[in-house]
Structures are given as C-alpha cells and as structure tokens.
Amino acid sequence: DKRFSRLSDSLKLDSLEFNYRIIGIGQKHFNKSLRQRDFAPPADGSFFSKNASYTGNTENFYRFISTRVMPEYDAQSDYRVLLGHSYGGIFGVYVGTHIENHFDKIYAISPSLWINSSNFLSNYERDSSLHINTSLHILYGSLEELNKVAPEIERFQKILKPDDFKSVAIKKIKWAGHKSILIEIYTLEY
C-alpha cells in the first residue's frame, strides 16, 4: 500500500533516534464483510449493545496481531503504535478501551464512531467502568462535518470522562476530508 510507503519515507526523513518497523495489515480490495469481521467490535454489551447489527470479531483480529504478527515480526520492540483509519479507527478505539494492549499510542484517524447508531458513545456515557486504557489520539477532518464522522467525534469529546482527559487527544484538521486526512500521517508524533 502506497500509504505505508509514504509513512516509511516520512519517518526516514525525520531522522528518528530509534529503530522502527511498520507492519501494515489491510485488505487488498475493499471488502465489506472482511472489514466488518476484523474491525467491528462484538455485540456483547461492552462496546456495542447486544442488539447492534453491525458487529464483528475484533478480539480474533487483535489476537492474530498479538500472538502471530508481533512475536514473528516485532518481538524486540519496546514501543508500539497502532494506527487505524475509518473502521480501522474504531478498531483502535476498541483496543484502547477494552483490551490490555501492547501499544504505547493509538491513532484513530476518522474513526467510525457512528456505526450502530453511535452505540459506543451511548455505552461509554452510560457505563462508569468504561475508560481509555492507553494514549489515544483521534484526528478527523473539518470537511467530515458533511458525513457522520465529525459530529460523533465531537460528541465523544463532549462526553469524555474526567479520568480519560489525560489519555485522549482529539484534533480537527482544517480542510481535510475522510480520505485526504491520511496525509496527516506524516505529521503524527511517535
């Protein structure tokens, strides 16, 4: 994927003082059923309500990353960043709230918090035990006011729990849309 190539090139230009490895997992072609299977959280009541219709198997996908990908390709790392866009972004939010994870930072770029009628936001607001357990950075574009992404991220920002303020950073990128926001990957601080 050319986005990972550009990210790698930008990291090289930044002359970072640490080694890094980029592992990109995606689908070769847009596939709604695979995207749902891998990135959508389950309807177990912890992220979405039990009657949610658009659900998947994020635990299996995360288990694959943590038990197969990391040990084989990234066993020596002492610092890890998870980056997800759109449905990958909601996967990142799920990992940041539900899984004792292996990531030091999570970047959720234009996460699809709107799926299942914003069910996650309702659960987050209602469930006092639901918290962000890692450094979560959410980026979205100002042009996403026209779709459901920006309004739901702005709602999340308003209902953010006091204990989570220190873990969550939300940034609106001027003149960026759902796909053009990916250019911001180059400006992220790792």
Image (spheres, grey):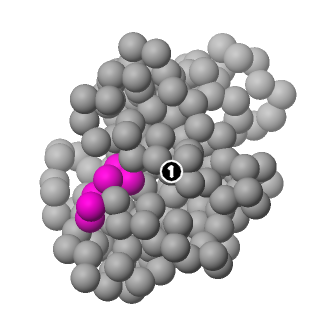
Q: Is residue 126 magenta?
A: no
Residue located beneath label 1 in the image: 156
User: Residue 80, percent across and down?
Assistant: 68, 51
Q: Residue 69 versus residue 133: which sits nearer the camera?
A: 133
Q: Residue 36 versus residue 139: which sits nearer the camera?
A: 139
In this image, 73 relative to 53: left or right? right
User: Residue 157, percent across and down?
Assistant: 56, 45
In the rendered image, is residue 65 in sight? no
Question: In the figure, residue 90 lies in which quadrant?
Answer: bottom left
User: Which type of secondary structure does the marked residue at label 1 adopt?
Assistant: helix
Q: Is residue 116 magenta?
A: yes
Q: Which corner quadrant holds the N terminus? A: top left
User: Residue 105, percent across and down?
Assistant: 68, 49
Q: Residue at x 38, y 53 (%)?
A: 113
Q: Residue at x 51, y 34 (%)?
A: 139
Q: Is residue 102 above or below residue 9?
A: below
Q: Residue at x 51, y 27 (%)?
A: 172
Q: Residue 77 versus residue 161: which sits nearer the camera?
A: 161
Magenta residues, start to end: 112-117
Q: Residue 4 versus residue 159: which sits nearer the camera?
A: 159
In the rendered image, is residue 149 in sight? yes
Q: Which corner quadrant holds the C terminus? A: top right
Q: How many marks?
A: 1
Q: Residue at x 63, y 76 (%)?
A: 128
User: Residue 18, percent across and down?
Assistant: 80, 34
In this image, 21 relative to 2: left or right? right
Q: Is residue 22 above or below residue 164?
A: above
Q: Amino acid at mark 1?
A: Phe
**For the residue carrying disc 1, how many other residues have a C-alpha within 10 Å: few (<14), some (14-19), or many (20+)?**
some
In this image, 7 relative to 58: left or right? right
